[in-house]
Image (spheres, grey):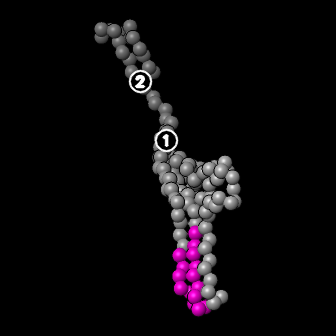
Amino acid sequence: FRFATINYGAFHHEDCATQAVTETWDSRACVGLNTNGTCTKADQSIPVYNTPHSNVVNVTCDSCFVGLKANFFFNIEIANRKLVGFQGGFTNGTVHGGISLMTTVSRAWNVGVDKTMPIADDASNPIVQFN
């Protein structure tokens, strides 16, 4: 090209859609980590830590995510067969994120108790007796 201007992006144009469609149409793309389809919530729980070989302590991040929902654009300008300008990036963006750690601690064990609780120091009439 000797001269060219190329613009790419998502823009509303009054000739392309009715007002009802234009009001509900969202052209923004979601770019993120562990995001759902709306870019506003976590897709799944992420394991953070488990006690090796015993699973006593379990830490998960139930709502860990970050998402950018925005329109992507780029503009290229060529003059005299040379690149004069190039722009690209995101517009009309929102960033959502969340962190929520869930910790579960569990341990099972048996306890052996040998105790007698007598009434008024009388060993023959215990209140409670564990053997």
Q: Which mark is residue 114?
A: 2
In which quadrant will I find the N terminus? bottom right
Q: What is the CA distance from the residue labelled 1 to the residue labelled 2? A: 31 Å
Comparing 124 with 36, the one in front is 36
The mark that comes first in sequence, 1 or 2, is 1
Magenta residues?
A: 73-87
Comparing 118 with 83, the one in front is 83
The reply, left or right, for residue 10 in relation to residue 116 is right
Between tags 1 and 2, which lies in front? 1
SS assignment at label 1:
strand
The reply, left or right, for residue 59 in relation to residue 80 is left
Dot 1 corresponds to which residue? 104
Q: Which mark is residue 2?
A: none
**Residue at 41% in and 24% down:** 114
* 99 versus 69 height, above or below: above
The image shows a total of numbered marks equal to 2
Give x and y (percent) for residue 103: 47, 43
**Farthest residue, direction bottom:** 80
